Every structure is written in structure tokens, then in C-alpha cells.
Amino acid sequence: MKKKTTLSDIAKKLNVTPSTVSRALDDHPRISDSTKKAVLKIAHQFNYQPNNIASALRKGKSNIIGVIVPTSDRQFFASIIRGIEEIVRNEGYSLIICQSDEQTSKEKEKIDALLQIQVDGIIASVAKETTDYDHFKKIRNRGVPLVLYDRIGESLEANAVVINDYMGGYIAVEHLIQQGCKKIAHFAGQQHIGIYQDRMRGYLEAMKAYNIPFNEEWVIESDLIDDTQKILELGKEMTQQLLNLPERPDAIFSASDFAALGAIQFLNEKKISIPDEIALVGYSNDFASSIIEPGLTSIDQYTKQMGNMAAKHFLNQINTKSGEQFTPELTLLTPELVIRASSLRNKHV
Amino acid sequence: MKKKTTLSDIAKKLNVTPSTVSRALDDHPRISDSTKKAVLKIAHQFNYQPNNIASALRKGKSNIIGVIVPTSDRQFFASIIRGIEEIVRNEGYSLIICQSDEQTSKEKEKIDALLQIQVDGIIASVAKETTDYDHFKKIRNRGVPLVLYDRIGESLEANAVVINDYMGGYIAVEHLIQQGCKKIAHFAGQQHIGIYQDRMRGYLEAMKAYNIPFNEEWVIESDLIDDTQKILELGKEMTQQLLNLPERPDAIFSASDFAALGAIQFLNEKKISIPDEIALVGYSNDFASSIIEPGLTSIDQYTKQMGNMAAKHFLNQINTKSGEQFTPELTLLTPELVIRASSLRNKHV
DNA sequence: TAAATTTGTGTAATCGATTGTTCTTTGAGT
DNA sequence: ACTCAAAGAACAATCGATTACACAAATTTA
């Protein structure tokens, strides 16, 4: 095992000081071209790799960004990460990816861990449990840039990028209405989480806009952030519940693809025709939605783009002089409806 | 923004030296209990957070492990990461997760980046493209522990953990035979990749063991590591190809779930009955396999356990005195057959 | 009681790169 | 020829924690 070569090794070889070598490698204007060339040559010859830890210590900058995802089991987050990486890699940043597993306690732990290893910034989506944001405030208090994506703490002053979930809910329901549905149910997520609130709001507004009467019984609120299998089961149960109603709905807009998948399985089992008896639209366009029969219409969230934007927000903050007043920016991405058989009643439109 | 408190801040406050504080916090036996208590108190009061970068520089240890995954789009890798984290978190390690996107060039880049930020070890699965392993050897040459998982370079001297893919192939095909299938086709992966070789070997051996004649035309080799949608299409094409054969197979063992999913979609379309006309077994037990109709029988790979084992191998290497001779260890995990409708002909067994 | 340990801390070097401050040399300008 | 500025590089401090070594005081041992 060879020991690493350091600045001083190169310096000794050339009879100059480490500072000269450092500046030469940094292309400092005060270093002569001849010296620069010589240094570069030896550096290459010795296969010099700068010690980033030393550099980080001196510069107070680690070139590492912490990314917190509630869980990486979902394609959603994998895609976000990819989006972030795409942008920051050229700037020389590495990512540390952490999972909060939807628990506030772990979220705190992870934030502490990231601050401890001195990340240059944190990009996070908040856990479903979280209602108190002090641990996030700690990030900003430490002077570490914070960017939130998708699930953001309302009360937090931070750059953020979210999908327009209101619009997502609206276009989903509008689509169902245009397919002739008049009694539209909604599988809603927990209303203390902004995105689910917005999707519900979109649902309600679309109904109102088209003068569709609203029936309270058709809205079922539940925890849509959980183990995939559980949500699947939940979807089945909720569907059963709807079928038991005196006035049975003719469509379901589910704020989660998985609950909708469960609904489809259940309806298939009961030989209830989709979309003719009940039409369905899900949310987030999971891969499985294209696999199930009939294919599940869903809202696509442009996750990679979301990652890209989050990364850009981070870079912006880094490049903002600390003197300037910080005003949080919010980026709103537009979701898209991906239409499949589960909602397509007018086959020939 | 408050500045962080350092060891010296505490030292000054107590009129001792930083070294004493350092030792006190480290619970050094030579430090008196009274001093320790005092230090702890002030440290807490000042909300002291050790500067890990400084510590890393001095100790030559970053407490960061680099994890390389070919792509994080698959649940498979998400699960592995989780498995690794579970183990190493208590030891104070953080993970940096990188994606090679199946490209050797990116794999090299990532390895360089990880070495540059001085990770304490690298846990990796090799990209499909990779046939030359020099960049991995570089890791060991630098004295950095390396652990491979799932896709390992045969010629690499490194700890590794893999699933017994031979057994996976064997039990999959044995199951099909037991269901009465006699003409079993195989969607094989690229044979330069060990896991696909092994699955194929399992297929062949099971056939031989049960005296099932082997027909070369029933084996189709293709790239099963690709964009999910592409593999889905590929699965359809390969199925078409099999249907065109003079002697049509009555079962398919696919080395990829996604190709099998494509096959199911295709067969459903053609109204060919599954499993009666053609039975199917996939590989890796993806979530979508439980969603499709009929459910796809598949081989489960215990991915979290694989992550656990990889992490343990890493810790072992760390704790091995460098003097001792290094002998690479290979852990072989046992896969499990998850039976669903796609292969279940004897419904009443 | 003298010698030998043990105990509790302080001193100072170190990890490797960075950077503000000299210092010397060279060259231009008058 | 002389002043002054710029160029090129060295010096030395610094980032914060760690640790080999030194040293005095307290305690034990003989």
C-alpha cells in the first residue's frame, strides 16, 4: 500500500514551498508559468490526489450535500436523487443520502448527523409524522442552506420546490367529469400534510366548477404513506366501504397510486367493471400502474425535474452573499395526467 | 448565526488545555472524574459539536462509507442500502450513495470521487458494462476496504456477498417441472455477467436432473439490465419469438421479473392461458409481480439481508489488523421461491 | 524515609491544505 | 542612475482535534 503524496512531497521534489505548489495547482496569477508546468508535471507523475479533508478543514467547506428522503423504497425518491445529482456533480459536490423512514425522531437524528459531518447544505422532504419543525430551523440557525422538496413545512422559511398538487387534484377530477362521471369519491391522505390537503382542494374545486354535488361520505381520509402492501389493503377496504354506501360512486380519485391499485384488484375480484361502473385515477404514476389490468390513469410528478430544481435552489443559496437578505423562493412544478384504461370511458374520443 | 464552539472554547472556560478537554470527552482513564464532569457540563452548556473534519484529518478516518449502486431506480438497491445502513449506523458511519448507471466510465468516476473524499470503505455492485476491473483494484491498492455485492467481479480479490443464483435458477425450474411443465424456455441475461450465468446453469442442471430434454431454441439471451420499459417490451418480443417456434414451450423461466411481466401482458393480449398453456417464473420478486394478473411467481432475493451482510464484511475488514494476511470471504445467501398464480397448475396441492 | 509508581495535566507536534503577510528580485519609468 | 511597482515565491499562521511525550504532585512500596 503506497502512502498518498501530499503537497509537501511535490514541494520538496521541486525545492519550493507547499504554498507555491498549492497556488500553482490553483492556477494563481502570481505563480510563473514555468513553475506551474513543473508542479503539474510532478503532481501527475506522483499521482497526487488532494486531501479533501484537510482542504475542508481549512476552507470550512466539505463539498457534501445531505439529502433526506422519507423512504427510498419508492421510485419517487430515487428519481429525485438522480435529479439532484445531475445538477450538483459538475460543481464538485457529493451527496449523502439519508432516510428518515417517516419518523420525526429519525429525521432529527439524520439532521444532527449531517450537521455533524459538516455538510454544505441539506435538501429534504419532511416525514409524514412531523408537525414541529424546530430541527429544521436548527439547520438554518447553523447557517447551513436548506432546500425542501415535495413535502415542505409550511412554517419554514426555506427555498422549496413542490408539485402543484392542487392542480394535480383538479385535472384528475376534471378528467373524470369529462368522462361522464358524476359521483366521484376521493381517497384522501392525512390532511395535516400539505400535499394531501392540496389534492383534496383540487378535487373539491373541480367538483364545484362543474356543479357536481359533493357527498361527504365519498371522501375517505387515511394514512396513505405507509408500507406499500398496507396501502394496497387499505385501498381494498376503502373500496368495500364505498360499495356499501346507499349511493354508490361511479369514480374514485385516489391521492395514492397504491390505494388505487388495491381498489382495482378488489373491483376485479368483485367483477365490477372498470371504468364503466367505476372509473379510477391515481396519483404519482408508479411503474405498477402501467402493469395492472386495466392500466391505472395517474398524475405524473416529474420527479427528476423536481430534483433538478432543488439542486439549483441549493446552488443559488450557496452563491448568495451572506450579507443579502434571504427571501425564500418557492418553485411550483406542473403535474401531468397520464391517461390509461382505468378512466377511459369514451374510447373513441 | 452563532459560531460553533470548539475544544479550545471549552478549555478556556475551564482554564485547562484543549488536550485535557479532548481526553475528558473521550473518557480517558487518566482524567479525573471531577474534570470530566466539568468538561461535560460546559460542553453541553455550549452545545459543543465536535468538528468531524478536523478529527478525520488527524485520525485519517472519515467515518464515511461509499456505496455504489448500478442504478437506484430498482427497489432491489433501495433495499440493499437500507440493509447496509441498519448495520453501520451504530458504528457511527454515514453512507454516500452513488450511481454508476451501469456505465464503466461513471463507475470509475464515482470510485475516484469516493477515494478523493477519503471514504473509509467502498461497498459496490459492478455495472453491467464492466469487464475490466482495474478501477476496483485501485481501491484495494489505496488500502481502502472493498466489499462487493450481487454483481461481483470474478477476478477481484474482495469480500463479497451474493445470492446463490444457481440455486435460484434451479428451484425455479424444478418448480415448473413439478407443475408438469416439460418444455421450459429461458429468458437469459448476458452471459458475461456472473449472476445470469449462474441462473442459466441452474436452469440447465434442473432440466438434466429431471431428464427434461433441452432445446437450444428455447433459450434467448438478451440484455436484461436496462430501462424497465424496454425490458418489458423485450419480454413481449421474446415471447412472440417463442410462440413462432415449431415446438412451442409450455413454460418460461425468466431471469428478470420485468421480462416476465412483459410476457404476461403479451400472453394476456393473445388470450393464451397462464399457467395452463404457458407457465411463468420470474426473478427478483418485484412489487409489480404481485400486482399483475395473474400474479407472477418469482425468486425473492432477501435484499436487506444482503445489505446487512455486506456491511458486516466491511466492519470485519476494518477490524482486521493490517498485518494479517487478507483472504477474501464470500457469503452466499439462499433465495426463496414465492409462488403465485402464474405457475400454479396444480391448484389443489 | 527514600525510591518507585501512579495520577492528572500541560506542551507541542501533527494531520495537509490554504492564505495573509513579508521579502527579494526584476523591470519599467523618468 | 534611482525610485517605484509588479512579479514570484517564501514564511508562518491557521483550521480543530488528537496524541506522544514530559512533568509535577500524590500515592504506594520497600
Image: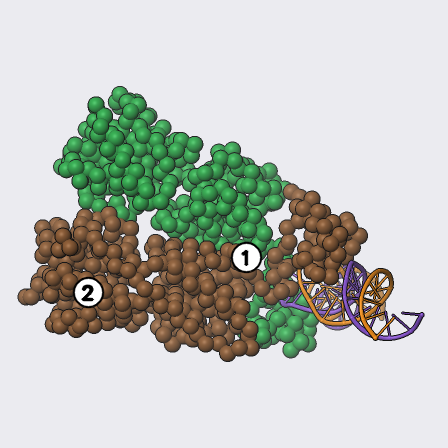
Chain colours: A green, B brown, C purple, D orange
Relative vertical location of residue B207 with respect to residue A262 in this rendering, above or below = below
Per the image, the residue denoted by label 1 is: B92
Seen from the viewer's position, the closer of residues C21 and B344 is B344
Q: Are marks 1 and 2 in contact (CB under 8 Å)?
A: no
Q: What type is the residue that disc 1 sits on?
A: Gly
Left or right side of B92 for A236: left
Seen from the viewer's position, the closer of residues A196 and A241 is A241
Instruction: Kindly indicate the quadrant of the structure image that contains residue A13.
Output: bottom right
Q: What type is the residue that disc 2 sits on?
A: Val
- Residue name at image x 28 percent, y 22 percent: A214
Residue B17 visible to an observer of this rendering: yes
Disc 2 chain ID? B
- Residue name at image x 46 percent, y 64 percent: B312
Left or right side of B324 for B233: left
- Residue name at image x 21 percent, y 49 percent: B292
Report helix, strand or loop for mark 1: loop
Per the image, the residue denoted by label 2 is: B173
| Residue B288 on image: x %, y % | 26, 50
Instruction: Kindly indicate the quadrant of the structure image that contains residue C26.
Output: bottom right
| Residue A248 on image: x %, y % | 21, 26
| Residue A272 on image: x %, y % | 16, 35
Quadrant occupied by the C terminus of chain A? top left
Left or right side of B154 for B118: right
